[in-house]
Image (cartoon, helix red, strand yellow):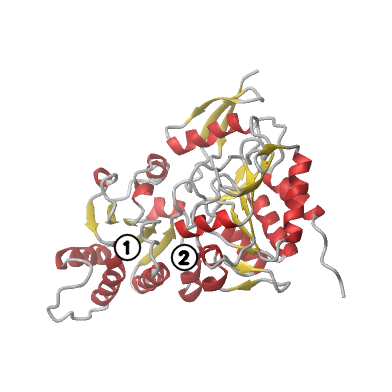
């Protein structure tokens, strides 16, 4: 019997659209009304999960055997790492933090650069509803993929009164979004920090004494200053292209300070945009579970934060990990090439609804998908939690259930 579900939440990307119509017979999804390719791909995953089988060193095994094998590796590990969870539900992220706490692991997200910066200078942010209802200048900085997303653009225009609005795109990747914007400014990534400092100086009335500004041409700088000064509500969407490079946290710090300075005369907020295919949630869960939003280490029996030492990339690149537990559908997102190459030297356990080819994959435990097979909640990239529904039956467990099984089997630390 067909059942049409309205207002279904899609976790296919950071937009987490919650207005999707899905037709199902209870056993599988028959039709999805969305034009978003990432959303279509996410819903199609439900057709593939049932065919996935647990593996131990490439050999088929039972679910119990795969879990027991993973527990054996964990009990032998001295410096385990938990990473991934980019599209996972909140209950799975909470369970991952609980597992890290119990086994003394390091747990990290792909957003450690942004977290490091915002813990230094703070963050002024808002929800997409406020952007839709109030913003008259929206600046997409290194977030061209978000601007090109039809569902995102539609969400900023539907259900709100018409607001005279200027849309500006900045960065190096501008080709996909040029038809949707009023103005584009091309910037090389290595010049963005200088461009922000120049912009801060001019907005403060500092005379550049006829010097050519670094990182941005004079005309573009003056036009950007004029747009900001003429606006009542400015919003920066800063994306993956902006957050790249060894000094990415410094760029985010500078942009956050710029936003705070603009607020002296008008409303201004910034929203961090994750890479395509990710959502924004683990940093929220880590923050209210441990007090830190990324790069958390439990080796001492309590959470410690050190972004230079405990980030997943740093731990892997310096060969300070002897077991990696990857969780989720896109578990390698955020890892550098060098870090991914180091995974070949250590055993890896993968827990999630999709198989990832890895050279040293010791165990694979397939799971169902929260939001299709199981209910739950997930964070949109503006920090808003949204509900997930379960409407298709499955024989697989959820990520949270698998992690809870592992926690229950891992040997408790000895008491003294």
Q: Would residue 156 appear left or right of 71 to someone viewing this image?
A: left
**Dot in front, 1 or 2:** 2
Return the residue nearer the eye: 328 or 390.
Answer: 328
Q: Earlier in the sequence, mark 1 or mark 2?
A: 2
Residue 109 location (% of width, % of height): 55, 59
Return the residue nearer the eye: 265 or 330.
Answer: 330
Residue 77 location (% of width, % of height): 71, 62
Q: How many marks?
A: 2
Q: Would residue 361 appear left or right of 120 to someone viewing this image?
A: right
Q: Residues within 10 Å of mark 1 (few under 14, many from 20)?
A: some
Residue 265 location (% of width, % of height): 33, 72
Provide the secondary structure element on which disc 2 rests: helix
Seen from this angle, which residue lies furthest right?
416
CA separation in Å, label 1 and label 2: 26 Å
Q: Residue at x 41, y 54 (%)?
A: 131
Q: Residue at x 46, y 38 (%)?
A: 38
Return the residue nearer the eye: 102 or 40.
Answer: 102
Residue 114 got which mark? 2
Residue 107 got which mark? none
Residue 286 location (% of width, % of height): 62, 62
Residue at mark 1: 232
Provide the secondary structure element on which disc 1 rests: loop
Q: Indicate whether 217 appears above or below 157.
A: below
Q: Residue at x 64, y 69 (%)?
A: 297
Quarter containing the C terminus: bottom right
Q: Indicate whether 414 appears above or below 350.
A: below
């Amino acid at each position: 019997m067909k059942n049409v579900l309205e207002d279904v939440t899609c976790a296919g990307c950071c937009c987490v659209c919650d207005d999707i119509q899905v037709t199902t017979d209870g056993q599988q999804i028959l039709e999805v009304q969305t034009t978003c390719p990432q959303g279509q791909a996410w819903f199609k995953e439900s057709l593939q999960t049932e065919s996935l089988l647990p593996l131990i060193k490439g050999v088929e095994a039972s679910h119990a055997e795969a879990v027991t094998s993973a527990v054996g590796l964990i009990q032998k590990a001295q410096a385990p790492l938990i990473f991934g969870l980019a599209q996972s539900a909140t209950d799975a992220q909470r369970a991952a933090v609980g597992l890290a706490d119990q086994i003394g692991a390091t747990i990290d997200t792909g957003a450690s650069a942004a977290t490091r910066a915002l813990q230094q200078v703070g963050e002024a942010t808002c929800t997409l509803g406020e952007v839709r209802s109030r913003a008259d200048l929206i600046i997409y900085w290194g977030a061209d993929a978000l601007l090109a997303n039809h569902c995102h653009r539609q969400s900023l225009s539907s259900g709100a009164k018409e607001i005279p609005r200027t849309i500006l795109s900045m960065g190096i990747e501008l080709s996909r979004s040029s038809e949707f914007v009023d103005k584009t400014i091309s910037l090389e990534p290595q010049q963005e920090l200088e461009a922000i400092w120049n912009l801060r100086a001019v907005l403060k009335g500092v005379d550049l004494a006829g010097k050519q500004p670094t990182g941005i041409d004079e005309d573009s700088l003056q036009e950007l200053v004029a747009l900001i000064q003429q606006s009542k509500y400015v919003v920066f969407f800063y994306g993956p292209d902006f957050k790249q490079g060894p000094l990415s946290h410094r760029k985010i710090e500078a942009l956050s300070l710029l936003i705070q300075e603009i607020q002296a005369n008008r409303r201004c907020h910034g929203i961090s945009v994750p890479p395509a295919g990710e959502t924004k949630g683990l940093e929220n869960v880590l923050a209210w579970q441990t007090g830190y939003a990324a790069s958390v280490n439990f080796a001492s029996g309590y959470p410690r934060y050190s972004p230079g030492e405990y980030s997943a990339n740093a731990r892997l690149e310096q060969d300070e990990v002897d077991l990696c537990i990857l969780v989720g559908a896109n578990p390698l997102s955020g890892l550098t090439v060098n870090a991914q190459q180091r995974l070949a030297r250590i055993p890896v356990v993968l827990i999630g609804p999709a198989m990832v080819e890895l050279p040293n994959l010791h165990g694979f435990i397939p799971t169902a998908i929260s939001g299709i097979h199981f209910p739950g909640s997930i964070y949109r990239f503006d920090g808003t939690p949204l509900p997930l529904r379960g409407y298709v039956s499955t024989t697989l467990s959820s990520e949270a259930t698998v992690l809870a099984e592992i926690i229950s089997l891992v040997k408790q630390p000895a008491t003294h």
